[in-house]
Amino acid sequence: MPGGLVIRDAVPDDRAAVLTFWPHPDRFDRRLILSRAGEEVLLVADLPDPGAGAAGIVSIRWSGGCDDPVRPLLYALEVRPDRRGRGIGTGLIRHVASLVAARGRTEITLEVEVGNAGAIRLYHRLGFATIGPHQHVWHAGTISGTAETLIMHGRTAHLMS
Ligand SMILES: CC(C)(COP(=O)(O)OP(=O)(O)OC[C@H]1O[C@@H](n2cnc3c(N)ncnc32)[C@H](O)[C@@H]1OP(=O)(O)O)[C@@H](O)C(=O)NCCC(=O)NCCS
């Protein structure tokens, strides 16, 4: 993990910094509402970079993903483009694993688009196993569509080691 990386719960003041690299204001606001309701946890990563703001985000949905009502879902993982390749994504995933383990849960699920080779490589390197292909149905306002994804599962004990 990069020196001085701090991972913490997101707050409304993170909005401007997060939207510079994750331009989804409605989703950010919704993640915060669901975090306050205890259904999710939205995390941000800060580098010791005065005034730079959040460098990465990730969310955990406790009730699981569309394929999986049991395992907590790791999603909305994004690192600022100019901060990638420094271990921030790894740090966020490991932090998620520790929060999931602290709740007595042993596995995490996630979905990744089949063409996202970089993220798939990262998940494999950290110990996630590919479970199989999935067709994800998404909705954005009145528009909807599908995306070809892979479902992956990771064991918290392995991810934290
Ligand atoms: C995937 C992502 C979160 C990784 O964050 P990161 O902080 O760069 O990750 P780390 O530094 O801990 O690990 C680096 C690994 O991430 C992967 N990676 C994916 N895209 C990358 C990029 N643009 N730059 C550097 N690494 C990238 C690689 O596997 C890399 O490992 P390698 O150096 O051995 O090739 C980040 O690249 C990102 O935000 N990508 C766009 C959003 C995305 O794809 N999210 C995942 C959706 S399921």
Image: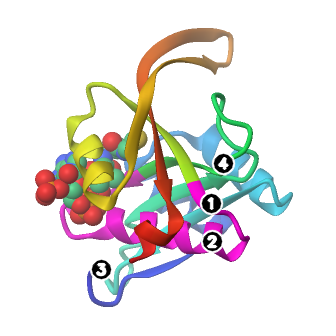
- CA gap, disc 2 to disc 4? 11 Å
Which numbered tag is attached to residue 1? 3
**Closer to the camera: disc 1 or disc 4?**
4
The residue at which mark 4 appears reads as 71
**Closer to the camera: disc 4 or disc 3?**
4
**Closer to the camera: disc 3 or disc 1?**
3
In this view, the residue in front, 122 or 82, is 122
Disc 2 marks a residue whose amino acid type is Ala
Q: Residue at x 66, y 29 (%)?
A: 66
Q: Earlier in the sequence, mark 1 or mark 4?
A: 1
The residue at which mark 1 appears reads as 42
- CA gap, disc 3 to disc 1? 19 Å
Instruction: Tell whether position 50 is magenta.
Output: no
Which span is picked out in magenta? 78-107
| Labels 1 and 4 touching (C-beta < 8 A) | no
Confirm whether residue 84 shows in the render.
Answer: no
Which numbered tag is attached to residue 101? 2
Name the quadrant containing residue 4.
Answer: bottom left
Disc 1 marks a residue whose amino acid type is Leu
| Labels 3 and 1 touching (C-beta < 8 A) | no
